[in-house]
Amino acid sequence: MAMIINDIYKKYFQKSKIFLYPLLGIERGNVVPEEVYFSISDKYKPEDRKLVLLYDTKMDLKYESFKEERLINHKLLTEWMEDNNGNEIFVFDMSSFASDWDLFLTGKYSQMSLKVRNEILNFFDKNSGNYVYVNSFLFPEKWFKRYAEILDVSEELLKEVGELCDIPNLEKEQLNLVLREECNTPLVNDISEVKVHFNQCDRCNGQGYIPRYNHISNGICFKCYGKKSAKPLVA
């Protein structure tokens, strides 16, 4: 059955979720991230080439097993943290896709390498509407005529523009991250009357690091951030 586009996709969508997430090699059908970004406020800029996945840990019962099998041991994973809403954030180093990443940032999707474009396209179900649109974004030369008919403009005009998808919105593709509160000893006026107890971190069992995750930030525990304890309790 021939693919048909009857209208232009008008709403903004996360470009990083469509064009970058498929490059991680996580097969379609797995637990889907709540959102995907390519920068974190005050931490990573777009040019740092860091892909950021945010997962709502409560949305899917399969999440924990998926995390263990597909995220934590991923060869590109560099950081793993938790925000103040209990969401988990995973940061992947995409430097191996440097040229394609830079083209992506400028909205030159059709100029990304053929191998990468095919990898992106093949991520989507061929019978889905997404596949048709992504195909037109990555291989616009096949679609200039159809888009010209829909927009009622000349085909030559679209060829001059060269792309059929708008560039990434830097503001919408940036995660404004507020990390889970760190555990700090509370300020007290009379320490003789106040006892501060610390709960042992249940993720690292009070070690401050997790040996099997040495490949991620030297194994530091991202629940207590190496402090070995959870939030303090004041008696």
Image (cartoon, grey):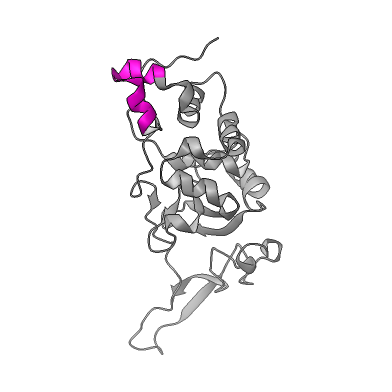
Residue 99 location, x and y as percent? 54, 49
Residue that extends furthest to the right in the rendered view of this protein: 212
Residue 161 location, x and y as percent? 36, 33
Q: Is residue 171 left or right of residue 59?
A: left
User: What's drawn in magenta, residue-wise?
Assistant: 145-160
Residue that extends furthest to the left in the rendered view of this protein: 152
Residue 130 location, x and y as percent? 48, 25
Q: Is residue 100 visible?
A: yes
Residue 137's place in the image compared with 49, above or below, is above
User: Which of these two is toward me, 147 or 18?
Assistant: 147
Residue that extends furthest to the top in the rendered view of this protein: 1
Q: Residue at x 38, y 43 (%)?
A: 168
Residue 214: image quadrant is bottom right
Q: Is residue 42 left or right of residue 51?
A: left
Q: Residue at x 60, y 29 (%)?
A: 122
Does the segment drawn in magenta span residue 158? yes
Residue 12: image quadrant is top left
User: Which of these two is toward me, 235 or 86?
Assistant: 86
User: Which of these two is toward me, 63 or 163?
Assistant: 163
Residue 220: image quadrant is bottom right
Does the segment drawn in magenta span residue 195? no
Q: Residue at x 59, y 63 (%)?
A: 202
